[in-house]
Amino acid sequence: MQPKVIIFSAPSGSGKSTIIQFLMQQGFPLAFSISATSRAPRGTEQDGVEYYFLTPEQFRAHIEAGDFLEYEEVYPDRFYGTLRSEVDRIAAQGKVTVFDVDVKGGMNIKRVYGDRALSVFIQPPSVEELRRRLEARGTDAPEVIAQRIDRAAFEMSFADRYDQIIVNDQLSVAQSDAARIVRDFLAR
C-alpha cells in the first residue's frame, strides 16, 4: 500500500512556508520532503539537510532510472526534483511526507499517489495583496516582483485542480483551516 503524502503549492508570497511551519509544530506525524538539486551548496547548506546535492550527470542518471516523482530543469544543467526514495525514507519513520512544490510538481505527485495524496493550494486574497506583500518584504527588485506576479497568475490558474484551496487572508484562520484539513486527511 502506498503511503499518504501532502502536497502544498502556492504563489511566492502567499504564506505557504509559514503555514507549513505551523503544521509541522502541531504534533501531526509529518516530515518535510528534502528536494534534490544539481546546483552547488550555498553558505552552510549540507547534503541531505537542505537538499540532496547531485551533479547534473547524477541527476540525469536518476531521471533515466525513473527515480523522480517530479523534476524540472530550471536552467540548463540546473535541476530540482523529488526522489521517490524520499517518500520511502519518511514512510519508514511512520510519517507522512509533506511537499512544498510548484504547481507542475504538485500535479505530477498527485497523479502518482491519487487518493493517498492531499493537495492543498494556498492562495493570496488577490493579486494586488500579493504584490503588496512582496513589496513589503523588501527583498526583491521591482522587475523580480513583476515576474513573481506573472508567475502567480499562472500558478493560480491551477488552483481548482487541487483538493483544497485555502485563501490566506488572515494567517491565523488559514493556519486553523490547514490544520483541520490535514487532521481530516490523516484520519481517513
Image: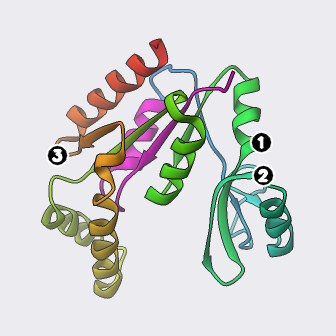
Q: Which class describes the residues within 10 Å of circle 1: few (<14), some (14-19), or many (20+)?
A: few
Front disc: 1 or 3: 1
Instruction: Please report the residue visible at 15 percent of the width from the left and 59 percent of the height from the top.
Output: 126
Q: Secondary structure at mark 3?
A: loop
- List x then y, in percent, for residue 140: 36, 78
- List x then y, in percent, for residue 173: 21, 32
Front disc: 2 or 1: 2
Front disc: 3 or 2: 2
Q: Earlier in the sequence, mark 3 or mark 2?
A: 2
| Quadrant containing the N terminus in the rendered view | top right
Q: Which class describes the residues within 10 Å of circle 2: few (<14), some (14-19), or many (20+)?
A: some
**Nearer to me, 121 or 65:** 65
Q: Secondary structure at mark 1?
A: helix
Q: Where does label 2 land, which residue?
A: 67
Give the answer, above or below, for where 144 lies relative to 103. Answer: below
Q: Which class describes the residues within 10 Å of circle 3: few (<14), some (14-19), or many (20+)?
A: some
Q: Where does label 1 land, which residue?
A: 85
Q: Earlier in the sequence, mark 1 or mark 3?
A: 1
- List x then y, in percent, for residue 124: 22, 54
Q: Earlier in the sequence, mark 2 or mark 1?
A: 2
Query: Tags 2 and 1 in contact by the CB under 8 Å rule?
Result: yes
Instruction: Please report the residue visible at 23 percent of the width from the left and 45 percent of the height from the top.
Output: 168
Instruction: Please report the residue visible at 34 percent of the width from the left and 72 percent of the height from the top.
Output: 151
Magenta span of residues: 1-24
Whether residue 54 is visible here, answered yes or no, is no
What whole-number distance in Å separates the C-alpha atoms at marks 3 and 2? Answer: 38 Å
State the mark number for residue 169: 3
Q: Quadrant of residue 180?
A: top left
